[in-house]
Image (cartoon, rainbow, N blue to C red):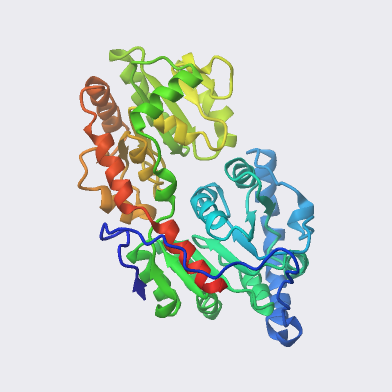
Amino acid sequence: MSSLAGGPLDGGSARTTFTGSTPPPLRGYRPPRRRASLRWWPRACGFLLDLPMLLAYLLLTPWLLQLVLVRGRAVGSMIQRLGFWSISLPVRERIWIHAASVGEVTAASPLIESLQQTRPGSEVVISTMTAGARDLARQLIPGVQVYLVPLELSPCIHKMLSRLRPDILVLVELEWWPNLLLACHSRSIPVVVVNGRVTRKGVRRLGWLGPLASWMARCPQRVCARSEVDAERFLQLGTAPERIQVAGDIKLDSLRGPDPQQRRIDLERQKGYLTGQFRWTAGCTHPGEEEQVLEAHAQLLEKFPHGQLMLAPRHVERAAAVLELVKRTGLSGALESDRGATRASVIVIDQLGKLDDAYRISDGAFVGGSLVERGGHNLLEPVAAGCLTCHGPSMSNFADMKALLAGQAWVQEIEDGAQLAQLVSRWAAQSGTKTGHRQGAQELVGRLGGATGRCSEMLSEVLS
């Protein structure tokens, strides 16, 4: 296992120089021939895996219907789910990036931008697991083809691959699906993992698969782990140490941007928000947390009647239900997409891709999934936006990030909703008097960045 010099844990400078080979010219490019006929055993194993997968889909049907009919989740194109992608055969190097959900799409964005600059002759194609992630990818990365990944059934995956014919598959974070990996193996398509992240729960769950999990761990040619902890977990799963390197978190590169204070001024003017008032955001909240957040805001309004809360549920399809909860508590609320919403006391974010703007126009932030047993969410997003930030005790999925920020005065841990109410009121009383944390946050994000260049360099080595 190798850790790149200047990696995110030692605060060194990133190596961003492109060293890969020149991509093949557009004219006359022929995709590499895949010796599928000589790799019969992966296909045979794939068909064997189809039987339990079909049974799993059958058993999950009531839950899937509940997600669609009750919670309003979008299914997306069933044609694409079956592997019928309307995509032309490749005429140049084709890089397939699979970013399952919204978080992975956000992480992949700076990497795709880097690849477009360093390998201008290449074509990037994105696949996502959810329709929401697909829509966000189209919004964040215009000009790139985006599709829904097929069902985990070998006929669907091979149908898609017969048209896609990628030169490489890039998995963002951890998307190990047996049939997907087997299909790529049968067609000699190299697989790499970027921003590799494995939770303790993930290691335990993969362990249930026994030898299959060990094979999946050995399948990727390279793994760019997000941290030393993640690298050790990949090693524990069975990935060869020479294939692992610690590259850092590519999400950090997307967080670096304009001065937080100036960005706030610009956004407030653009969106029509009142200036000079305390505003805080509760991001990625789950059921059981919104009630505590709203109680904290109600107590804040007793002392600061013009305070404002931006409330962003983890799943935006819950926005209408969260708005009803706001109204039942007696607070004035509106959906962020509604006209005139900027004057409401509680604004419920109901669109993907809006959370970052909410952080950037706020003084403080609470990161959800931490007052309930969900393992928390990304702390660096509000920190990089210039927010005083807090979280609850449940941060097992981001333990390394929590440890990294533990010594910073502008990040605090709370135990319950009562402490949240006290902290938010204290922030409001100090609003405008202490702003040094913004500069410190920008410097921290700058020191930790550079993972995009390291991952881009690794991809060029595999493609060369």
Asked whether, in this view, residue 156 is left or right of residue 25, the answer is: right
Q: Residue furthest bottom?
A: 38
Q: Is residue 397 above or below residue 297?
A: below
Vertical placement of residue 361 versus 151, above or below: above
Residue nearest the observer in this picture, 450 or 191: 450
Residue at 20% x, 39% y is 409
Q: Quadrant of the C terminus?
A: bottom right
Locate residue 188: give its quadrant.
bottom right
* Residue occupying image coordinates x 34% and y 68%: 4
Location of the N terminus by quadrant is bottom left
Residue 208 visible from this viewpoint: no
From this view, report whether residue 89 is shown above or below residue 439: below
Residue drawn 39% across the image and 26% down it: 264
In depth, the one of 191 and 313 nearer the eye is 191
The picture places residue 130, in percent across and down from the top left corner, at 63, 49
Q: Position of residue 379 (x, y in %)?
A: 36, 44
Q: Nearer the viewer, residue 181 or 250?
A: 250
Residue at 69 percent across and 53 percent down: it is 148
Count the numbered circles shown.
Answer: 0
Work out whether residue 235 can be spotted.
yes
Query: x, y percentage for residue 238?
Result: 45, 78
Residue 319, image x, y percentages? 56, 30
